[in-house]
Image: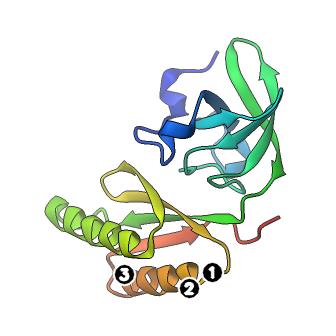
C-alpha cells in the first residue's frame, strides 16, 4: 500500500489544459525508493501517454515525451518506458534555503521573468524549487545555462539538467 505522503503531485502542470489523465512514475531509479511522482498526461493510445507536466523528480523523461505504461493494481497506470522523446530537457533549480524567504521569492520571480523572455515553460513545486522545460541543444538552453550559472556563482541557487540527450 502506498502512503499519500510518498507521492509528489503537480499543483500547476505546464499543459494542464491538454491533459486528460494522471499516470504514475516510480522514483526508485531516480534515487527515491518507495516514492512516486503523479504526472499529468494526455492519452494517445491504449498504453501511450504524452507528458503534460515537467517532472520534478523523475529522471530521463520530459514535458512532451510519449511514454508507455503498464497497469498497476489499485493505482493509475505506471510508466514502463519512454516511447518517443520530445526533444526537451528538464532543469531543476533549487534556491539556497539559507537565504531569507523574501530573497528566495525575489530571486525566483527574477528567474521566472527570464523564463518568460526565453519563452520557456516551467512549474513551481514549492518556494525555492522550479522545474524548467527547454529544447535540448538550443539557443534557449545556452542562454538558460548562462543565467543559471550566474545564479550559482552568486550562490543564489544550484541547478541540474536531468536529461541531456533527446534519446
Is residue 113 rendered to the left or right of residue 88? left
Label 3: how many Cα within 10 Å (few below 14, some 14–19, many 20+): some
Callout 1 touching callout 2 (CB < 8 Å): yes
SS class, disc 2? helix
Is residue 100 rendered to the left or right of residue 32? left
Q: Is residue 74 above or below residue 80?
A: above
The C terminus is located in which quarter?
A: bottom right
Please give the residue where the numbered disc 2 appears in the rendered image.
Answer: 142
- Residue at 55 percent of width and 46 percent of height: 53
- Residue at 81 percent of width and 31 percent of height: 45
Q: CA distance from mark 3 to mark 1?
A: 20 Å
Callout 3 touching callout 1 (CB < 8 Å): no
Q: Residue furthest top?
A: 74
Please give the residue where the numbered disc 3 appears in the rendered image.
Answer: 151
Q: CA distance from mark 1 to mark 2?
A: 6 Å
- Return the x and y of residue 72 as percentages of the image width and height: 77, 19
- Return the x and y of residue 160 as percentages of the image width and height: 55, 70
Q: Is residue 95 above or below residue 52?
A: below
Image mark for residue 138: 1
Q: CA distance from mark 3 to mark 2?
A: 14 Å
Foreground of the two, 127 or 63? 63
Which one is in front in this view, the residue at disc 1 or the one at disc 2? 1
Which one is in front in this view, the residue at disc 3 or the one at disc 1? 1
Foreground of the two, 50 or 167? 50
- Residue at 33 percent of width and 58 percent of height: 128
- Return the x and y of residue 33 as percentages of the image width and height: 67, 39
Foreground of the two, 32 or 66? 66
- Return the x and y of residue 126 as percentages of the image width and height: 35, 48
Amino acid at each position: 500500500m502506498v502512503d499519500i505522503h510518498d507521492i509528489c503531485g503537480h499543483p500547476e502542470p505546464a499543459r494542464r489544459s491538454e491533459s486528460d489523465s494522471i499516470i504514475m512514475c516510480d522514483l526508485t531509479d531516480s534515487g527515491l525508493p518507495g516514492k512516486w511522482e503523479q504526472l499529468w498526461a494526455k492519452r494517445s493510445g491504449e498504453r501511450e501517454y504524452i507528458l503534460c507536466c515537467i517532472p520534478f523528480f523523475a529522471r530521463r523523461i520530459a514535458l512532451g515525451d510519449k511514454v508507455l505504461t503498464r497497469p498497476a493494481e489499485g493505482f493509475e497506470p505506471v510508466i514502463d518506458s519512454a516511447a518517443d522523446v520530445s526533444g526537451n530537457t528538464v532543469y531543476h533549480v533549487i534556491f539556497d534555503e539559507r537565504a531569507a524567504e523574501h530573497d528566495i521569492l525575489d530571486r525566483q520571480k527574477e528567474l521566472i521573468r527570464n523564463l518568460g523572455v526565453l519563452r520557456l515553460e516551467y512549474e513551481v513545486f514549492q518556494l525555492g524549487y522550479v522545474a524548467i522545460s527547454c529544447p535540448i541543444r538550443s539557443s534557449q538552453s545556452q542562454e538558460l545555462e548562462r543565467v543559471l550559472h550566474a545564479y550559482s556563482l552568486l550562490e543564489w541557487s544550484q541547478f541540474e539538467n536531468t536529461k541531456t540527450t533527446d534519446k
